[in-house]
Image: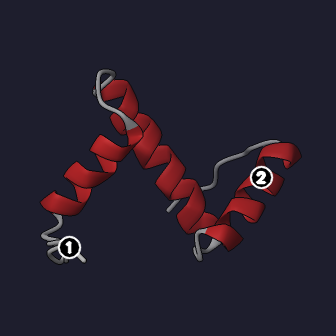
Amino acid sequence: MGIVNIDEELHDQIRRASVVGCRSINAQAGFWIKIGMLSEMNPTLTFNEIVARELQAAGVVPPALRVA
């Protein structure tokens, strides 16, 4: 683990986003860093496509949708 220096405004945004995502501040920062890195490495993919790929790689299987 290391220390990363960020400005106060970004830290405040991370803190606010962490509440919405039910993550710790460090987990939220890590999520944004990982998604940003994956976005740079895969510029043709959307955010949703990146998240879907990561969930699939982790073995998450969505439940079947029921048609009403």
Q: Would you place residue 65 above or below residue 52 in this image?
A: below
**Left or right side of 62 for 44:** right
Q: How many marks?
A: 2
Q: Residue 18: image x %, image y %?
A: 66, 67
Q: Residue furthest top?
A: 44
Three-letter code for the amino acid on which mark 2 is drawn: Gln
| Rendered image: mark on residue 13 | 2
Please tell me in which quadrant of the rendered image residue 2 appears. Answer: bottom right
**Left or right side of 38 for 22:** right
| Rendered image: mark on residue 16 | none
Q: Secondary structure at mark 1?
A: loop
Point out the tag, 2 or 1, that comes first from the N-terminus.
2
Q: Secondary structure at mark 2?
A: helix
CA gap, disc 2 and disc 1: 39 Å
Q: Would you place residue 54 above or below residue 66 in this image?
A: above
Q: Residue 21: image x %, image y %?
A: 58, 69
Q: Residue 25: image x %, image y %?
A: 66, 67
Which residue has dot 1 on it? 67
